[in-house]
Image: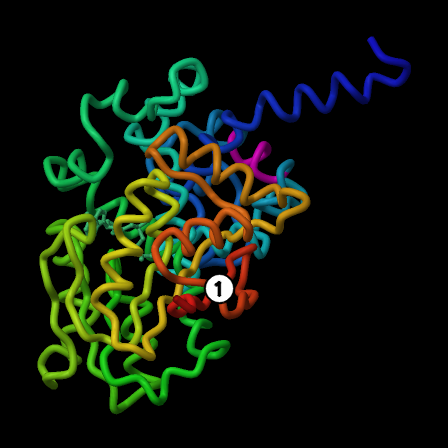
Amino acid sequence: MTGNGSAEREVLRLMTGPWVARAVATAVELGVLDRLAEDAADDADGLAAELDLHPDRLGRLLRLLAAVGVLREQRGRYRPTEVGAALRRGHPSGMADLALLYDSDMFTSAWTRLADTVRTGEPAFEAAHGTDAFTYLEDHPEDAARYTAGMAASGRFSTAIPDVHDFTGARVVVDLGGGDGELLAAVLTRAPRARGVLVERPPALAAARTRLGAFVDAGRCELVEGDFLRGVPAGADVYLLSRVLHNWSDEDARAVLRHCREAMAPDGLVLIAERVLPDDGRPWLSSVLDAHMMVMTTGAERTEREYEALLRSAGLTTRRILDLLLEMRLLVAGPAAP
Ligand SMILES: C[S@@+](CC[C@H](N)C(=O)[O-])C[C@H]1O[C@@H](n2cnc3c(N)ncnc32)[C@H](O)[C@@H]1O
């Protein structure tokens, strides 16, 4: 034991992290937070009766959630904290969807094989599920729905993109791998003269149809089933790549960027929303998500310098890097001088 046990305590905190994550996701799954958020403070017995749960075991789950800051306890009665309220279904942050995705077997069984990735360099996901993540999603509609909802939740930062970049002069904006269309909807709302094209694989197109339906009906948006590794729609003045390049190896990411370079208008831009890491130092969230990228895909969270090298190899260069929320940044790239 170290002098005051602080190192051991920290090891315990780190190693019990997955148990806490499971406890939080379980509370979401069982509807505990939804019920607690509706009323004033509730006790475990009353809540157990309403939700048909075991009173003692629920009481112990609530105690843990209070210990980690999800609930607040006063004389045996519980209320959600701000964190607990964010995990309620229907909360605008979508954090309940994110918790269920991060705790899903699709993710956790890949993470179990992290050592394989570190040994071989191959994504653990493929060892766990027998195929790459995006092909897997096409054959597993329940996981695909959970993935699209979780991505939409973790993609809320995107609505701030039109605050930091002016789209009002844009004529055609192509969102490659645009997920459920949240970002493209935000751009089209702020740039009333622009037309949008969302390129996606089939599972996400279903959600995009809902999100972008009004723009499609107004003739301002097209939803295209496509593969950005093979090519991208020609002639746009803005190509959006939000959390796409981090899913791919340098070779594949370069192919996508080259397609954009070849297809874009002469004064076109490529906007990359990613956790672009500073060249020095690694913020914790970006480092965790970088590890997640190597478990799930051939990709990585890259540094500013790494992005610039990638862009240069595709005939592009960084013009600006703008800060968004939660360590996300917007890299604005244009054609490199010949
Ligand atoms: C991490 S998600 C990002 C979604 C969205 N852009 C966002 O930031 O929330 C990556 C997206 O790329 C899509 N995708 C993967 N491979 C693709 C391909 N070859 N062509 C087009 N889209 C693809 C996936 O379906 C998924 O929706």
Instruction: Pinpoint residue 52: horizontal percent, then vertical percent.
Output: 33, 35
Q: Is residue 226 left or right of residue 276?
A: left
Decide: few, some or many residues near mark 1? Use Cα within 10 Å; few <14, some 14-19, many ≥20: many
- Give residue 101's position: percent from left, percent from top: 34, 40
Q: Quadrant of the N terminus?
A: top right
Confirm whether residue 254 shows in the render.
Answer: yes
Q: Bounds of the magenta span?
A: 61-66
In magenta stretch: residue 64: yes
Task: Tell me what residue is drawn at x 19 percent, y 66 percent.
Answer: 198
**Picture layout, residue 40 above or below residue 172:** above
By what rule are the colours in the image chosen? rainbow
Circle 1: element type: strand
Residue 74 location in percent, x, y?
67, 46
Residue at 27% across, 18% down: 127
The residue lying toward the viewer, choosing from 103 and 224, is 224
Q: Residue visible at 34% across and 22% down?
A: 122
Q: Is 278 left or right of 310, judged from the image as shown?
A: right
**Depth order, front residue of 108/225:** 225
Residue, disc 1: 318
Queried whether the magenta region covers residue 75, the answer comes back as: no
* Visible residue check, residue 29: no
Q: Residue extending furthest front?
A: 338
The amino acid beneath tag 1 is Thr
